[in-house]
Image: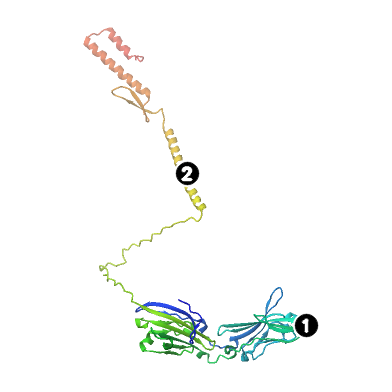
Amino acid sequence: FSPALGQNDGSGVVVATYNISAPQGSQAELQCHSQRMVWTQDRLKDRQRVVHWDLLRSGPDHAMERVIDMFSAGDQRIYNGYNQGRINMSKTAFKDGNFSLVIKDVAMSDKGIYSCNLHHHYCHLYESIKVQLNVTRSARKERRFWDGQKAVFVVLVGGTVALPCVNRRPIWTEGNSQEDQQQVVHWDRQPPGVRHDRADRLIDLYASGERRHYGPLFVQQKMNISATAFSQGDFSLTISDIQPLDQGLYSCHLHHHYCGLHERRIFQLTVMPPVPQIPQEPTDEPQYLPNEEPNTNMVEVPPHVINVILPEQRNHFLQQLGYILAILLLLALVVLAIILLTCHRKRQDFDPRKVEILTDVKTGHTSCVKKECERSITDVKSSNQEETKLDYKNNLLKEAEMSKLCSPKAIDLDREMEKPSWK
């Protein structure tokens, strides 16, 4: 897009130029929009044009107030009851273009800056004229002059003054007759090397709905404008199946004769080589068994979602670190409690009075092991004494047999061995 504002070649003001490139065989849309060209039928003609006078007082408050307004039908409305009968406008203002404000019996409170505002709602136009009014009590100071920005009137108190506001342009003085024929849009095309005055007309479109196509039939079929152009303000030209012969300079002309709108938008269309298409190899569809459906035995894999938490502040990180340390300390306390309970249980289970006596066959020594024992130490000692006594008696008997002696000494010895006090 390259702006070219203010250029006028007789067919309208060039408001913009565009460079558009499109590949061969594609479709291009040359966009041309204007809300001022939206057509709305003027059913309320007295409401389409309005004039109103406002007063900006020169006091410290600089208050702005509406004085009077009038529609194109001639209806006037005065906003302050004090001004009834002393302020008025000509009822033929929208016919002769004289919108001057007449003030009778001028008072000191009337001084200030007056503005004459003209609004055309149908054409979206607005114009304003300012006039300054000063009031004096001396007839010698009464005069009129231009201060470089606005007209200044110095009026004597109690006199009559007409603040000028004249606009005789046809848009303000004429009615909106045949409004549907006042708006027209047409598209032109300049082939390369052809001047603007010899451009080919493509399409004419009127607000009434009339449409005219020019050129060969194949050109008419590939270039078109929307049927709702005037209701939406979209006058874009659509070109289908672009070919190298379609390139050139296109112009969109917007004319609103009643509102004085004449605009032109230029489009430089360049056709590029077609975009190569990569052929896709056809893939054979998988074959299924008669009793097998493609959607059976399918496991839906849930999407892998990774949650990433980014701390917004440093305090957030310290808080999370505190949570982690507190959890670790709690786990350590739990482990320590388990260890202490285990040690206490082992102490309760151990009884030094219950031991297991093991005798080493080779050495003859006894050892005590932490195990519950069914016999006491006393029983063990008595059994050992009996075994020793029996061995000793057998030895004596063997000696007696060998010596073949039977003496009282031996008999006394047997008696002595049977005594309980024998050791």
Q: Secondary structure at mark 2?
A: helix
Of the numbered discs in the image, which one, if any, rests on residue 138? 1
Please tell me whether residue 258 is drawn above or below residue 399 in the rendered image: below
Q: Quadrant of residue 357?
A: top left
Residue 28: x and y in percent read 39, 79
* Furthest-right residue in this view: 138
Q: What residue lies at 47% left-to-right and 56% top-to-bottom?
A: 310
Residue 200 is situated, as x and y percent measured from the top left of the image, at 41, 88
Q: Residues within 10 Å of mark 2 (few under 14, many from 20)?
A: few
In the foreground, 208 or 27: 27
Please state which amino acid type lies under the numbered disc 2: Leu
Rendered image: mark on residue 60: none
**Whether residue 211 is situated above or below residue 315 in the rendered picture:** below
Residue farthest top in this picture:
408
- In the foreground, 372 or 60: 60
Distance from the alpha carbon under mark 1 to that under mark 2: 100 Å
- Please state which of residues 195 and 309 is positioned toward the viewer in this rendering: 195
Location of residue 16 in the rendering, given as x and y in whole percent from the top left corner? 47, 79
Q: Is residue 266 left or right of residue 169?
A: left
Q: Quadrant of the C terminus?
A: top left
Q: Residue at x 50, y 50 (%)?
A: 318
The answer to the question of whether label 1 and label 2 lie on touching residues, with beta carbons closer than 8 A, is no
Q: Residue 329: which numbered mark, if any?
A: 2
- Disc 1 is placed on an element classified as loop
Residue 243 visible to the viewer: no
**Mark 1 or mark 2, earlier in chain:** 1
Residue at (67, 88) in percent of width and height: 89
Q: Residue 98: x and y, percent?
A: 64, 89
Q: Is residue 322 above or below residue 164?
A: above
